[in-house]
Amino acid sequence: MTESDDQTYVEWIAREARRPVVMGPAARTRIMDAVRAEPAPRRRFWHRLIEPRLISASPIASLALAAGLVGIGVFGGTFVNNRDGLTSTGLPQAVPALPIARVPVSDTVKVMTFRFIAPQAAKVSLVGDFNGWSVDETPMTRVDNGGVWSVTVPLSVGRHLYSFVVDSQDWIADPRAPVAPDDGFGHANSVVLVSRGSSS
Amino acid sequence: MSRHLSSLRAAVRLVGLVAVRAGAQTSDPLFKLDQTSRFVVDATIDSAKVAGLPWNFLILRAREGISKGADSRHIAAAVRARFASLKDARALFGNISDGELNAAAGLLEARGVRPEHLAPLKNQPRGRSIVSALTVLGDLVTKGIPSEEASSAIIKLWQGGAGDADFMGLYHNVESDILQGLNPGIALQNRMRESLGPSGKLLPRAGESETPSP
């Protein structure tokens, strides 16, 4: 076969391929009948679960659904702790100011009461390594008109650094406790030692 | 239908983005650090994990700085300093509890306190904690007593068999003397004479008899 014969053959194939296929009017009906006659394939249960499908929803409903999912995620992430009693960030759990009767006391956790005199203060907080140095975590309560503020917290046995924060801005070390060496941030910390037998 | 789906996707992406940021801020205590300082702090924490050091104290150090309003670079420097002092404390004391290690590390960051000052406290008998000795030493140094003088006093008490109550007793007595106007160094010397006998052995405190009563 010469090159000229090849070209002629290719042109013939192309011409045939371009020619429209004319189907009789009954052909489409016959094909569809044949398809319907075939038994539907059996889908497994998990196929139905993973099969993509279209869902229609209004924008408002979509936003409400998305906000709900986000709320669940944020709530779950905030309150999940690991087995060691540490938060997901590796920090000790925050210590809430609980009434004495509800505080679990064990060999490794003791109840300690902190008192601080600040007659002019509108708000005093106990802040320390036991509550992640959070100014809002452990508010103190004014217990009398003389300006004595108090809070009772459970502390694990060991050494803890703490300070009092007056009106959310003044960091003041406990005048009745040992002071830790320079904290490096310009505010002195006090030290409380919690031993297995201690409570204060 | 396709317009609804596009709206749904856009809404989910938008709310998701907001949630990721909000979630990251609520669960990440260090989100207030600037990018460079955050990188330094994270790298230091990773190094502490690799070295087997209690890295939670580094996070607490950073959180302390954030709560106290320190700037990010200052906080990163403080975290690095604590990492270095934790390593020094581990090298000095070996396998002690995390709390003791952190107390020693904090003390080693104090001006003038060197590892050799604390060396006699290592190899403590089983069940005897060095935390109260370190705490009172830190307090004495903070009061302005030279670290060599303060550590020498604490080591003498320790070697004389002092316990937690003895160290805290020394703290209260020195504090009381200072409030009455005595120089901190003089107050310490006086109280040490009261605490230790000529042989260097711990004397019984007031109200205690030398031999246990039946």
Image (cartoon, grey):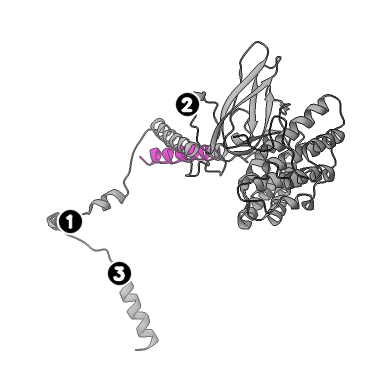
Q: Nearer the viewer, mark 1 or mark 3?
A: 1
Location of residue B52 (image quadrant) = bottom right
Check whether the beta carbons of the residues at disc 3 and disc 2 lie within 8 A of each other.
Answer: no
Tell me the number on the disc at residue A102. 2
Residue occupying image coordinates x 18% and y 55%? A42
Q: Which residues are magenta?
A: B1-22
Q: Which residue is mark 1?
A: A28
Q: Are marks 1 and 3 on the same chain?
A: yes
Q: Which residue is mark 3?
A: A17
Q: Secondary structure at mark 1?
A: helix
Spot occupied by residue B50 in the image (x, y as percentages of width and height): 61, 57
Q: As displayed, is residue A63 above or below residue A16?
A: above
Q: As displayed, is residue A41 above or below residue B208?
A: below
Front-most of B88 and A109?
Answer: A109
Q: Residue furthest bottom?
A: A1
Q: Secondary structure at mark 3?
A: helix
Front-most of B103 and B47?
Answer: B103
Quarter of the picture containing the C terminus of chain A is: top right
Horizontal arrangement in the rendering, residue A16 relative to residue B79 (left or right): left
Which chain is disc 3 placed on? A
- Please tell me which of labels 2 and 1 falls first in the chain: 1
Q: As displayed, is residue A142 above or below residue A95?
A: above
Spot occupied by residue A188 in the image (x, y as percentages of width and height): 75, 33
- CA separation in Å, label 3 and label 2: 87 Å
Spot occupied by residue B209 in the image (x, y as percentages of width and height): 68, 34
Which chain is disc 2 placed on? A
Q: Does the segment drawn in magenta span residue B13?
A: yes
